[in-house]
Image (tube, grey):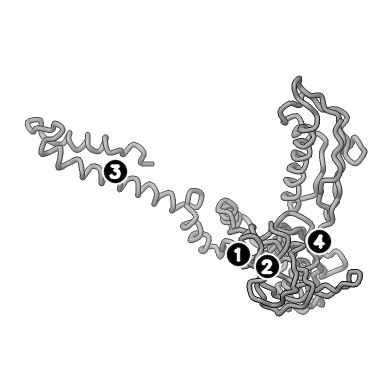
Amino acid sequence: MYEDQTYEKILERSLARVGADVDKREGSLIMNAIAPVSAEHANIYILLDGIISDGYADTASREYLIRRCAERGITPHPATQAVLKGKFNMEIPIGSRFNLDELNYKAIEFIESKSEGEALYYYYQMQCETVGTEGNKHFGELSSIEFISNDLEGSLIELLIPAEDDEDTEILRKKYFASFSSNPFGGNKQDYKDKTNSLDGVGGTVVIPVWNGGGTVKLIIIDSEFSKPTTELIAFVQEAIDPDPRGTGTGIAPIGHIVTVVGATEKVINVSCTVILLEGYTLTPIKAKIQEAIEGYLLEMRKAWENGSLIVRISQIENRILSIEGVLDVLNTKINGSTENLPLNVEEIPVIGKVEVS
């Protein structure tokens, strides 16, 4: 708004107000007096421009957007801690701390013990002490921070509840504007979706009302990595929404609603096609790029899964293959052996299977 209020223009206007009989050349008394003031005025305009931008939600910086959101009862989701499954060759105390790479983990709950051949293993929920998605990425042998036993062996083998980073500023901005056009109340579809998606580890929710008679609600979820949720995450969401599914209102769900939480099921997508390459390109590296392109397309679909039924489209797959450097044309593309698009039902999410390229 004030881009034209530069130091040079402010100085020029200020000097124009001085009489013509006064020396206004650089280094003169009047120039040396006005120049610093003009510089400060230019800085004030810069700050004023920022104040105006921060006063409107569509241009506000994160700090001031959070303040605007608070007026609507909206708060950004904070970063959360990952929970993983730890496998040990002996029992360990709850609260024991371990290290893997540069991250520390703490045993928070015993899961089960299980025999494998002649060996007995103990499984625990291990919570990463560092918040954010970095805790989702590390698996392997654990090192004990506090001494337990010389014979202790343990490792992280599975991600149970994915961590999330601080909510993205642009997503928060969309939520702010969406709050003006939606009026959720306890128990409607939008409210169930909002409440469920706000829980740690949940990346998307589909709400199916009266799925098993009046008062019943089915919530289908995926995790925050946009994958099939673990049984532990499903149990965590069930406990938060309706721990006693008899309509008693002991969780988030209102009285009279019987809520069932299930995970989305995976639909394996096998793709086959024939590609024509430009001169100088070979098939082997192109195959890897095609696999990566298809995986990216299916990830985009999983991210949009909660917005409606999905259709895996041959045209979309071919467009992504054609965008790969070195590919001249693509022919005979099939999805799961068919030349037709593949519609998915509401409970299915697409995952990559075999990719055959000739």
Read off the residue under disc 4: 263
Cα distance between the residues tagged 2 and 3: 58 Å
Location of residue 147 in the rendering, given as x and y in whole percent from the top left corner: 66, 76
Specify the quadrant of the image occupied by residue 326: top right
Between marks 2 and 4, how big is the CA–CA gap? 33 Å
Residue lying at 10% horizontally and 34% vertically, measured from the top left: 19
- Three-letter amino acid code at the position of disc 3: Ala
As drawn, 24 above or below 82: above
Q: Kindly identify which residue carries mark 3.
A: 42
- Expressed as whole percent of the image width and height from the top left, the position of residue 207 reads 77, 60
Q: Determine whether the residue tagged by mark 4 lies in a helix, strand or loop.
A: strand
Determine the CA span between mark 4 and mark 3: 57 Å
Asked whether disc 2 touches disc 3, contact meaning CB atoms under 8 Å apart, the reply is no
Q: Would you call the spot at circle 1 few (<14 residues within 10 Å), some (14-19), or many (20 or more)?
A: some
Q: Secondary structure at mark 3?
A: helix
Q: CA distance from mark 2 to mark 1?
A: 16 Å
Residue 110 against residue 262 in the figure, above or below: below
- In terms of sequence position, does the residue under pointer 2 or pointer 4 come before the other? 2
